[in-house]
Every structure is written in structure tokens, then in C-alpha cells.
Amino acid sequence: MVLVPLFDIVYEAFRRGGAVLFEGGFLTDVPPNACSQLSCQTVGIGPDIVGSVPVIGLASAIAVPIGVLAAIFAAEYRTRGVGRAVSFVADVLTGVPSITLGAFVYSFFVLYDPRLVVSALTGGLALSLVMVPIVTRSTEEALRLVPSSTREAALALGISKWKTSLRIVLLTSLPGTATGVLLAVSRAAGEAAPLLFTAGGSLVYFQGWDRPTAALPLLIYQFALSPYANQQKVAWGATLFLLLLVLSVNVGSRAVIRRLKRRMGHN
Amino acid sequence: MCPSTPPSAGAGDQHRIDPMLMAGTPGAQRTRAPSRWADLGFFVVVAIAGAAVVVLALALVGVLLYNARASIGAFGFRYLYGVTWSPNGNIYGVVPFVAGTLITSAIALALAIPLALGSAVFLATRAPSWLRGAFGTAVELLAAIPSVIYGLWGLIVLHPYMAQTVEPALQRYLSWTGLFRGTSIGLDLLTAGVILAVMTVPTITAVSRDAMASVPAAQREAALSLGATNWETTRMAVLPYSRSGIVGGVMLGLGRALGETMAVVMVIGGADRLPTPLLSQGQTVASLIANELASNNGPLQYSAVLEAGLVLLLIAIGVNAGARLLVGRVFRITGGPVEWAARPARKAAASTTQVVAKS
């Protein structure tokens, strides 16, 4: 009963989007304009796939270093209460509605530089805010799976704290950290709410950091509300693409995490 | 590395190298001094990153507060109990949207809690271990689906079903409750609540499964040995023990339902008036922001929308902080899900955090 929606969503995505997704050129062509005739071509989602890359890339470039370093602070300096506080704040931030993160970036840039409000730049910033707490929390979990005997062994050999943290603890937890980052990226890839006011959406290919850019979830949102059959069809094709992407990343990373836990003796 | 190992630290239980102990060793002098600066530098770098996370949280509140100052100045507390939201009259009160958020979240929880607790009990106590793994993975995948896809599914698949089948049936059989007046168009609070229920079930299931599984086996066995049936054991030994974990899971689910935007905005209809339950078009705080933040009806509306964002943010922070404290407490008392995971089947500790990260 609980799983009916999962199967139905996957089923509907395949039924309505399957034929479109595997049409030649769907992944590279530009999205269709509104068109009501039956002869309308369903074309592609190329700009949205390409447009997601710089936005998510910028978000990761900001969020991964900050998140990983904050996680090291939270996990390796945990004895000081501050580390615990950071992990609690990150935890609470994962629960902040992503629309408020979008509104935050939007209203900040309205004050700072109105010309940049709707652009790939602010889109990336908004998504990085979504990613930072997730990266922090999952990295911290991964770091804490590293047995403290490993740390103590390194410190007992006279290796300094920073080398221990970076080259031994972080390296040991690298598979866990990397899958955590991957999960955060897949989460960001599906987020539409923070991009509504920031990336803005567009029907053409990426045009620069200061211009509005297309993104898959925005396309799905816009075309889902479209009354035209060809645009709805494209929305379903894009849905199937995004669904396959997100679900495969999740299945894969969960398998890695599970194996990792067993190896570390936690399971 | 041998020369830098202080001879006096030979005792096996020495956790850290005390710099004072190393002072006497000639070889240590060279490696120690730079590494202490490096350690300090490293601490500063990670502390800055840690602080950045905290600053981000404060900036979030600060910027929204700053931008909402026009609306706060114009309406004061009237904003919080005003029932009119009128861009034409330039009067803004947030009550219709808070009501929309609360009603949809209440529908979601009312539908999701029985389903989620049922499956959590099943997963934690009755399911064979292969099914436990598969079901657990599927529930977590449900949490991973982007919300805009739930929205599309809600709009194209669920909406006609609600409009043609569910809502007419509710109107026919439950009209005496007075809850189902209006026309069954399918784009209303009820449909939004159903979508939110689908989205919150995985969160509640995963967290309460972990809480139930952390009940010590001795507790369960004691009840069974007193002749309790399986159901009585669950009710009297498992549920009370894991109660605060379950409540925490429900609050995490609530946090997700309160802030959900994309799925809601696509099915709720978007009407800026006080909703009448349950078949009326409405607006949640999140969908209000999505629909009206960039609508350019003047600075006062902009400011009022951002104040609504602030209200939503504070509600969400409160609910989430409460949930974390409850979930954290139950796992501290019981020694955490890790202890449990060591024994029965696989499913393990971090699943809570992962689902949490999704929500």
C-alpha cells in the first residue's frame, strides 16, 4: 500500500515518457514552443540537461568544500561543544524549506545587484545552500564511522592532527563521503523550488553566468502546467530521464554505504 | 617517523602526543614546531567552515527579516492574524496561507501516520529479513524522488482520479461532516494533502522503524514470555519504548509537509483566500512564495511575501529542532540504532540520517 505511489510514478513515467525519451535527438534538441496541432513535433530537453551542469557544478564547487570542512570540524573536534552545535545547526538546516532558500538568495540579490537576480549564478548559489547541510551531515556520518583506533594510531605515530584528519580519517571515509556528496548532487538535480526565482528557466542553451538558464526540474514544472500536449509529453520524457538518474544514483550509493559499514565493523 | 616518537609515550594508552613530552627528543624539535602551526591553521580553516554553516542559518533569518521590515512596519501583529490578502487593497494578512499549510499538513499526517506506523511495525518486528531490505530500500527511494515529479504525477494522474472518483464518493457518503462542500474539481487542499501524505510516509516509516528496532530484544521477550500475543507485545512493550522516536519521525515528516512547495503548488489551485475545508482551492505559505514573490505588485507585497517566508522558516526550524532533539534523545538512551544493527539483520544506523537529509 505504501509502495503503490512509487510503482505508479515509475510506471506512469515509463508509459508516458518512455517513447519520448528514446526518440532520436530528445536529449540534444531544444524544447518545443507551445503548439496545438497534432502534427507538432515533440523535441528535446538538450538546453535543460546542459544548463543543469554549470548550475549544479557551481553549487557543488561551493557546497562540497564548505560542507566537508564543516563536517571535519563537527566530527573531529566534537569534544568541544561547538562541533556538536554545528552538526545540530546543519541538521536543522536540512529541514529548511528549499523555497525559503530560493527566496533568501533572490531577496539578497535584489538588494545587492538587481541585474544578477535571475541568472545561472544565483541558481548555483541557491542550490549550494540546499547542498551544504546535506554534505555536512552525510560527511560527518561517514567520518564518525571511521574507528577512533585509526585516529589514535595515527596520532600515536606522531602524525599531526591536520594530517590525520585529512589524509587518514577523510581518506578512509572517502567512499562514504563521496556517496554522500553524490546523494546531495542528485538531490540538487531534482530541486525546482530554489530555482524558480533564481535560474529562471529558459528554452535555449546556456548563455553565460549572468543570464537566465534552463534546468530540468524547472522544465518539468513549466511544461506540466502547459495546456499543450507536445509540451506535456516533453515534461514526461524529462521526468523519466530525471527519475532514472536520481534513482540509479540512490540505489548505487546506498549499496556502497551498506558495504562500507560492514567493512568498518559497524554491522 | 621513529625519531619523532617520544620515548616516554611508550605506554599504549597514550591517545595524543603531548608536546611537552616531545620537548626532550632532539629529532622532534624540527617536526613539531611547523606542525603545531599547521594544526592551528587547519583548526581555523575547519572552524571557519563550521561557522559558515551557522552564519548561513543566521543570515537566512536576518535577510528575510530585513526585507520584511516594510510589511512589519505597516501591519505589525495584524499581519499574523489578518485574514485578508489583497494586493489590490494593499492589505496583507498571513492567516489564509498558514491555514492552508496546517490543513494540508494535517491531512497528510492523518493519512500517513497509520500507513507509516503499520509498515514500520511490520518492518521492525514481523518482516523476513530479505523483505525488510527490499522494502526499506523502496521506501528510501520514495523519499528520493524529486518533488516536482510528485507534482507532475499529482497533476496528471492523481488529480483526475480525485476529481472523478474519490471526491464525489466522499461528498456522497460523508457530506454530513460538512467537510466536503464545494465542487469536486480535484485541484484543492485535499489533493495537496494526499500528495503530501505520499511524500511524508517514507520519512515517518524510516525513522520510526529505527526507533522500534532499537527496543532491546529483552523487553520484547519479557512481554512474550508473560504470554502476550504479538500484537500485545507491540502495543505494550515496543510502542511505549519507542514513542519519542516515533513522535520525532512524525515531526520530521511534518517538517517536510510544511515546507513542500513544488508538489503543492501544482495541485492546490492557488487562491488567496481563507480556505474552507477540504475541497476548496487554497494556498500554502510555500506555494504563496512560489506564486507571488516575483509578481511585481509593488514593494509592500514583496515585503509581505518575504515575511510569510520568515513565518514559514521559523515554523520549520521549530518543528525540525524539536524533532531532532526527540530523535537524538531516543537513540542516546538506547545506545543508538548501531547497537541494534549489530545483531539482527542488516538495515542500519545512518538510514535515519539519510532519510533526514532527504526531507
Image (cartoon, helix red, strand yellow):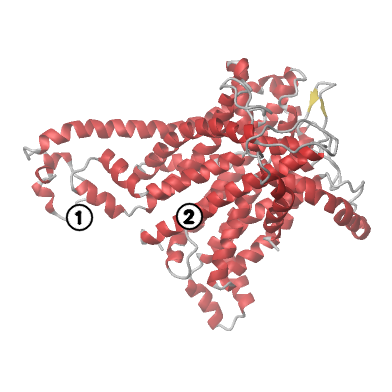
Query: Same subunit under labels 1 and 2?
Result: yes
Numbered circle sitting on residue B13: 1
- Above/below status of B297 relative to A53: above
Say which chain tag 2 marks.
B
Quadrant in which the N terminus of chain B is drawn? top left
Q: Give the distance between the C-alpha atoms of the residues marked 1 and 2, in whole angstroms.
A: 30 Å
How many numbered dots are placed on residues in this image? 2
Circle 1: element type: loop
The location of residue A97, given as percent across then percent down, is: 62, 38
Q: Is residue B323 left or right of residue B266?
A: left
Q: Is residue B301 visible?
A: yes
The residue labelled by disc 2 is B350
Q: Nearer the viewer, residue B182 or B242?
A: B182
Q: Residues within 10 Å of mark 1 (few under 14, many from 20)?
A: few
The amino acid beneath tag 1 is: Asp
The amino acid beneath tag 2 is: Ala
The location of residue A203, given as percent across then percent down, is: 69, 28
The location of residue B253, given as percent across then percent down, is: 64, 50
Tag 1–tag 2 contact (CB < 8 Å): no
Q: Is residue B328 visible?
A: no
Q: Is residue B185 left or right of residue B151?
A: right
The location of residue B308, given as percent across then percent down, is: 70, 31
Q: Is residue B176 left or right of residue B294?
A: right
Taking the spot 51% from the left edge, 33% from the top edge, the residue there is A57
Give the mark, 1 or 2, whose residue is nearer the N terminus.
1
Taking the spot 53% from the left edge, 33% from the top edge, the residue there is A128
